[in-house]
Amino acid sequence: MAISVSKIDPLPFQIEAVYEYALKLPQVRFMIADDPGAGKTIMAGLIIKELKLRGLAKRILIVVPGHLKDQWLRELKEKFQENFEVFDRNLLKNSYGSNPLQEKHQVILSMDFAKQDDVINVIASSHWDLVVVDEAHKMSAYKYGQKVKRTHRYKLGQILAKNSTHMLFLTATPHRGDPENFQLLLDLLREGFFATTEMIEESIKSGDNPLFIRRLKEDLRDFEGKPLFTKREVKTISFNLSDPEVELYNQLSDYISKQYGRAEQENNKRNVAFALVILQRRFASSLYALLKSLERRKERLEEFLRAGSVEKEEAFLELEELEEVEDSTEDETLEKEREWESVSLAKNIEELRQEIETIKTLIRKTKEIMEREGETKLRELKRALEEGLKTIEESGGNRKILIFTESRDTLEYLERKVRDWGYSVCTIHGGMPLEERIKAEKDFRDWADVMIATDAAGEGINLQFCHIMINYDIPWNPNRLEQRMGRIHRYGQQRDVHVFNLVASNTREGKVLEKLFRKLKEIERDLGNKVFDVIGDVFPNKNLYELIVSAVMQTRSLEEIERELEVKLDRDYLERLKREVFEEALATRNIDYTRLAENYERAKENRLVPEYVEEWFKRALEKLGGRVKERKDRFLSIEEVPYDLRERAKQNRQVVKREYPKATFDKEKAFKNPEAEFISFGHPLLENLIDLILERFKERLLNGAVFEDPSGRLEGFLWLFEGEVRDGTGKTAGKKLFCIYDNGKELSPINLNILWDLVPVDEGAQAPTYNIDEGSKKAEGLFYQLINQYKEEILKERERQARIKQKYGVKSLERFIDDLGWKIYELEERKEKGEKNLEGVLAQLKERRESYERAFEELKNQIHKEKKLTPGASNLLGIFYVRPKYKKGLADEEVERIGMEFAMAYERSQGREPKDVSKENLG
């Protein structure tokens, strides 16, 4: 259902993950861990929509890195017509002591905002039907011997796991070369479900892994079997800074080193003086960005000087915290950087004066270079643009080039310069409201030659109509490179993608980046260009961000850093990459595209025809006093939505507008006209309209109605029942509609699709005399047979799921409990013999054993309850009489009977057993 009511055309592997893995689980606790670019947001949207349509999820929380909040808001609104609200500090401030999350039903939350003490307390007292976590690998924990170090994000994950019914994780790098870290991540979904890596691999080979699915980029295909991704060529453009630029670079480095020396004297050496590193990052971005940062710093320090005191602020962060800043929104990062730009380590007024003079010298030098000779990198950009245009001409692509930069100052600088060179330019940055970013994307598609973008703005924009990208500066967090490339190297890209990286060879960070790109090129020759998807994990046990910062701060020699990047590309190393980094062992390699395509086509054939839904909607809305008319362009104009309908939506915490000037029930038209409101099942307007109509007219429905069958086959009464099966947890295991046909001689089930072909007869039409009580007993008797058959279908799948849980979950937990029992026994023996300081370790082991014992009992109880299925009472939705529109002649019926008998006899002669489905009106 979710596919037909959403503005998406899902790919076969997306349908497989959603409908053949996640939604088959009685309780969705699942991780989608496909390679980058597989469309995990679309899969999550389908699961959200489907659980809502099935009545299994109302309260939904989505937890994402801060810079992805807008992307999720936009995708869910545009593709699934789902309105979510971002929960932030302002909402918390205005809650006046109450829990603001209790009032919200569809919320998006930043991961690092959520882990703060006051926010996590609010989350801990809220329960959710479904929690979705994007980039779930960031909720990491690490095992050191018997100890487990849980990050703040992991502790957040534990609370979310405890307070949610369904839980969905999304990540492209679940394993990250650390099997114990991976098992701890899976523990958030189901504690202790896999005791060993071998059990995980066995479940993947058997095709019965109930916790996650992973597909590799090279295995992803469309319905025609074509590869999803074009080729990608990454080229490093190395250049040397001019002598004056090198001189400025060295003067800036001396200033930073001097300040950093003071920082080391006052703080622990593990801390990083990031306030100072910012200036070096600005230089690496552009001279203009450096100039603006220096001017802001000078202005702030002069304020301190006039005030006669030096403001002491916290200038230091742990590396882990620095990387978390990278996940913040662009405005949040900018605000933090503005604070750091103004931090001084001067101990007195004299030192402050000296620092201001140093900054003035740096400003003067920067301006001289910009005015006299211009910036070397700018000239390289001009050449890269020309090379990009040449590539476009050769490939016949669109005249579109995307330029990325880290700095908003650089963006403004480049916009002026590139426009002066004769290009039409548009820009996009994280400070723009979402609507402006969407407009910028449209401007780039419609008229601009060049788009200049910052990293945060790049998230959530889809630019596959462009296939040339230039990285004007290289993010020090290498994973950002993949995110940038993903804007154009994605599904829908028709041409090979070309990426140009500008790197200054004669700077310390430039040397590290050059070495990094050279090594990646070597690995690419053996393993393909997906190496750029996992840059941060290619070098074992190396934090590339830390290496670059160390080079800039000169806390380690370049030779030492380059040695760390020197890996031997032998067979063992390449196999390790395949196994641990590309995580091939975790991947489901065999995707049955033919079967998936057939199932998809069948689902499309059985979908509710939008014209029928539209016709019902118009009649129902007018019945309640609303007004709707057809426009000249064949769209609908809903001119007035009744007050009662809007109030009903408000009671359900949904928004229904007073009017919809341009609306459609046709998915294809909605695709081509994004400004039109797409109305279908799940849309608040239609859902609340159905509720009100059922509430007000159910009695009339039960009184019966008269329809005509255009095929002339049916003459009798139709009973329409809703059936429900519940499990031992009290939750709905399945719901189904049943239609029973009484022709006066016998009762038989009939295909629901026939209802769409029936034509209502004018009010006042009379049905023949019918004994309702007797008919009701017979119809209910057949209904209970049918609902029990349906229960058996559900039970078959539930028993399969139970066997899987028994095979892996129960067995793993038994193993963990036994292993811990032996460890506790050994430690207690050592303690009895007089060994000291074992109490802490013993307490930890006992706590873990108790946790596994609880999980063991809960899993066994869950398995038992999920198999205990009970059909609910019959819910009669309506009864109506059907008469043939055109009475068939006896000759016609006789000819049809003889033809059918002949066909069935032939089928039997071929060893097949045919079934007469003429009454089901299958066509």
Image (cartoon, helix red, strand yellow):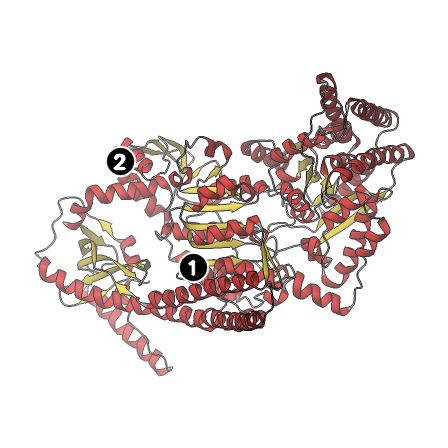
- Give x and y (percent) for residue 14: 51, 57
Q: Is residue 2 visible?
A: no
**What secondary structure is marked by label 1?**
helix
- Residue drawn at the location 41% of the way across and 52% of the way down: 50
Label 2 CA crowd tier, 10 Å (few <14, some 14–19, many 20+): some
Q: Amino acid at mark 1?
A: Leu
Residue 308: quadrant of the picture: top right
519 or 116: nearer the viewer: 116
- Give x and y (percent) for residue 89: 50, 34
Residue 861: quadrant of the picture: bottom left
Q: Earlier in the sequence, mark 2 or mark 1?
A: 1
145 or 206: nearer the viewer: 145
Label 1 CA crowd tier, 10 Å (few <14, some 14–19, many 20+): some
> Disc 2 and disc 1: Cα gap in Å?
37 Å
Question: Above or below — where is 443 with respect to 460?
Answer: above
Residue highlighted by disc 1:
23
Question: Above or below — where is 841 with respect to 155?
Answer: below
- Residue drawn at the location 57% of the way across and 44% of the way down: 65
Q: Is residue 881 left or right of residue 868?
A: left
Marks 2 and 1 in Cβ contact (< 8 Å): no
